[in-house]
Image (cartoon, rainbow, N blue to C red):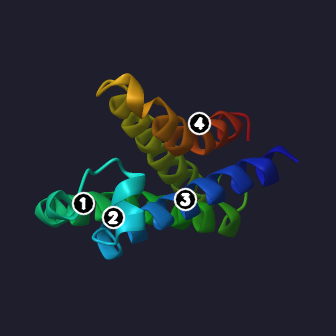
Amino acid sequence: MIPILATVFAGLAALLHVYIFVMESVQWTQPRIWKRFGVPDQATADATKPMAYNQGFYNLFLAVGAIIGLALFWAGGPGTVADVAGRTLVLFSLASMVAAALVLITTGSKYLRPALIQGTLPLIGFVLFLFV
């Protein structure tokens, strides 16, 4: 049961980070998106587009790492190379997501909610994967 729950939370964390990638790297200059990120106006959104584009890909790469790790984890039997590599990749990806959320909190209290959104699923997945 724990492996399934761990996989669900890790998978949801990956999907969330893919969605963040889409918002930051594809949809950034749309008002409904930049307003969600607290950007004050279209000119600022346009000026920060390269930074958001880069940051979005960072989120995508974390998601891809978690997804590949999950695939390896489920492809191998206990103690196989695939199992160990999969666990390692999932734990690293989830820990990086949590660490990024913690860094976000250090930028100001107004970022507490986004940090919780960004970090809760990977934190739960990480803890669950420790017991698998």
User: Which amino acid type is shown beneath numbered disc 4?
Assistant: Leu
Q: Disc 2 to disc 1, how far (Cα)?
A: 5 Å
For label 4, count other residues whose C-alpha is less than 10 Å away and answer few (under 14), some (14-19) or many (20+).
Answer: many
Q: Quadrant of residue 14?
A: bottom right
Nearer to me, 102 or 114: 114
Determine the residue positioned at 30% across, 65% down. 57
Q: Quadrant of residue 28?
A: bottom left
Q: Disc 1 to disc 3, how far (Cα)?
A: 16 Å
Q: Is residue 54 left or right of residue 15?
A: left
Image disc number at residue 52: 1
Res. 108 visible in picture: yes
Q: Quadrant of residue 32?
A: bottom left
Image disc number at residue 123: 4
| Image: 20 above or below 116 | below
Which of discs 1 and 3 lies nearer the camera? The answer is: 1
For label 3, count other residues whose C-alpha is less than 10 Å away and answer few (under 14), some (14-19) or many (20+).
Answer: some
User: Which amino acid type is shown beneath numbered disc 3?
Assistant: Leu
Q: Position of residue 49 (x, y in %)?
A: 18, 65
Which of disc 2 and disc 3 is earlier in sequence? 3
Which of discs 3 and 2 lies nearer the camera? The answer is: 2
Image disc number at residue 16: 3
Q: Is residue 114 left or right of residue 21?
A: right
Nearer to me, 98 or 70: 98
